Image (spheres, rainbow, N blue to C red):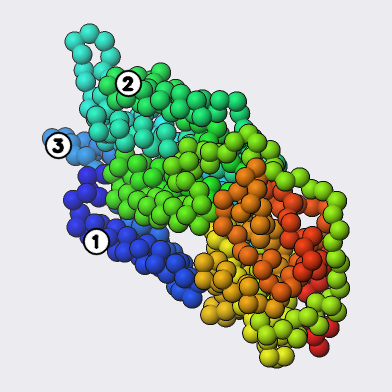
């Protein structure tokens, strides 16, 4: 491990790797440069992995004795190298198969699952380092006058270890809950436990106390109790958060996974892990803060869990009621949009489920042939992951200059002839501005109801959005409901435009 710290070529390689990761983050900040950003990230990770393997090849010592000499030689432990390469091969195979098979609609669940694995890896590394600290180079062996020798972990390493295991455990259990919610195994409505804030505060203080006591005493009881309590608080923090806020949770857990990796990088004396973890942790925290501002949420309440929702708000707010509404057809929609000067398309998770992005772009091209100005409005939390809709539209080769964020386009709805909402519910719900009992209250939404006509594509009137609340836009006089699978409805509209 010391070789990594003093070898200038290793330090240079890790520096190049870190620069690649920074360029990757910069590239991923825009759809136009995202592919290049991904390439930089892959190059950086390849350099980091190869350099780590080269500088940490397991060796075994051989003692050769002669008549009047003895020599110690080191050789590569072939069995250990085989095990490492086999593990890398299995992981790479799983990653390739998953990446090729996963649908874009399941990408948020996949990201949450990856975060859980990063957290679990941090926990396992911390546990291994605690059980055998001498092998990690973080302890001194003390031989008492009476009794067996024992290892004393360095004070700084204890801090790194306990932070890594705590953050990793929180990331793991929190990501598992996020995965279950996103995958539909748990309901999207918040699960509000009695006195949950007091419970969270108590568990948090207990983790801090036992972590401090572990730093003082290196006690196994303190270490394992911190592990268990951290798993528990990860569960407690994410359970109260409703489905509408889940994109922020994914971003927040991304930040946690980065800090866990950085803490373990200190334990392993690996500067690449420290750099990578710090970049992921800080960028995830910045993204979470930006999304909190976009949703009018408190960043502190995100960290505390539950966004400060009351029991009344968490109950689902406005319940679905029977009210009159107007149903339209593909022919109606085609006629209205072909006569419009401007159409704003608002995509949502329903579009992702139906995989309608390609035919939607085809519809937009047809409208342009009719002289219609077409724009796309993207809410920061449309879908279930930051940037979900941007990726889908980029996949369909939608021009980047036609895609606008909420703050850039919201004022245009009042001067727009048609707002075409395809599979977006919560992000267009005006209850967020008026109903204090709604779980989405305070979240900025797209003002589609201000358009002259709203065409709302939805599978049926029976369902509600991910937050579990009904949308008043469905029942407004200027709204026409287009009830069908999103892809099939847009295909019919394209035929009618022809």
Q: Which residue is mark 3?
A: 69
Q: Which quarter of the figure is the N terminus placed in? A: top left
Q: For the residues marked 1 and 3, what is the alpha-carbon distance in whole angstroms? A: 40 Å
Q: In this rendering, which labeled residue sits more in front, label 2 or label 1?
A: 2
**Outermost left residue:** 68
What residue is drawn where x is 56% and y is 71%? 411
Q: Position of residue 21 (x, y in %)?
A: 37, 62
Q: Nearer the viewer, residue 178 or 138?
A: 178
For the residues labelled 2 and 3, the Cα–Cα distance comes to 50 Å
Residue 12, labelled with which disc?
A: 1
**Does residue 465 sit above or below 209 in this rendering?**
below
Among the two numbered marks 1 and 3 on one chain, the one whose residue lies closer to the N terminus = 1
Neighbour class for label 3 at 10 Å: few (<14), some, many (≥20)? few
Horizontal and vertical percent for residue 11? 24, 57
Q: How many marks?
A: 3
Q: Earlier in the sequence, mark 2 or mark 1?
A: 1
């Amino acid at each position: 491990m010391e070789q990594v710290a003093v070898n200038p070529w290793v330090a240079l390689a890790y520096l190049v790797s870190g620069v690649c990761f920074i360029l990757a983050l910069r590239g991923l900040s825009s759809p136009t440069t995202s592919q290049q950003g991904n390439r930089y990230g892959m190059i950086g990770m390849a350099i980091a992995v190869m350099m780590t393997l080269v500088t940490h090849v397991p060796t075994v010592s051989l003692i050769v004795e002669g008549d009047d000499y003895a020599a110690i030689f080191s050789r590569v432990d072939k069995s250990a190298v085989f095990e490492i390469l086999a593990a890398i091969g299995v992981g790479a195979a799983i990653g390739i198969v998953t990446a090729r098979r996963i649908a874009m609609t399941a990408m948020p669940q996949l990201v949450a699952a990856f975060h859980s694995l990063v957290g679990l890896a941090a926990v396992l590394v911390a546990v291994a380092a605690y059980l055998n600290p001498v092998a990690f180079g973080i302890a001194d062996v003390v031989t008492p006058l009476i009794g067996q020798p024992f290892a004393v972990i360095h004070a700084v390493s204890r801090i790194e270890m306990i932070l890594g295991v705590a953050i990793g455990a929180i990331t793991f259990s929190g990501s598992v809950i996020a995965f279950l919610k996103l995958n539909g195994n748990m309901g999207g409505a918040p699960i509000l436990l009695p006195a949950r804030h007091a419970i969270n505060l108590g568990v948090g203080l207990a983790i801090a106390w036992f972590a401090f006591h572990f730093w003082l005493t290196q006690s196994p009881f303190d270490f394992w109790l911190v592990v268990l309590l951290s798993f528990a608080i990860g569960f407690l923090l994410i359970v109260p958060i409703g489905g509408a806020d889940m994109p922020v949770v994914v971003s927040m857990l991304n930040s946690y996974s980065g800090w866990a990796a950085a803490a373990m990088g200190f334990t392993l004396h690996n500067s690449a892990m420290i750099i990578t973890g710090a970049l992921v942790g800080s960028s995830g925290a910045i993204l979470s803060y930006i999304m909190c501002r976009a949703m009018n949420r408190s960043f502190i309440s995100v960290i505390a869990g539950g966004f400060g929702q009351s029991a009344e708000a968490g109950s689902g707010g406005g319940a679905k009621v029977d009210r009159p509404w107007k149903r339209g057809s593909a022919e109606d929609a085609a006629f209205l949009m072909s006569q419009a000067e401007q159409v704003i398309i608002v995509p949502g998770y329903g579009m992702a489920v139906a995989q309608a992005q390609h035919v939607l772009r085809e519809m937009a091209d047809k409208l342009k042939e009719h002289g219609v100005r077409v724009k796309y409005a993207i809410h920061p939390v449309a879908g279930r992951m930051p940037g979900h809709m941007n990726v889908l539209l980029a996949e369909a080769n939608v021009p980047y200059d036609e895609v606008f964020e909420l703050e850039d386009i919201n004022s245009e709805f009042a001067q727009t002839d048609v707002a075409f909402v395809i599979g977006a519910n919560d992000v267009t719900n005006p209850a967020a501005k008026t109903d204090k009992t709604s779980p989405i209250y305070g979240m900025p939404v797209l003002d589609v109801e201000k358009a002259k006509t709203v065409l709302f594509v939805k599978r049926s009137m029976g369902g509600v959005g991910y937050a579990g609340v009904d949308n008043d836009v469905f029942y407004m006089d200027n709204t026409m409901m287009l009830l069908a699978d999103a892809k099939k409805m847009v295909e019919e509209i394209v035929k009618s435009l022809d």
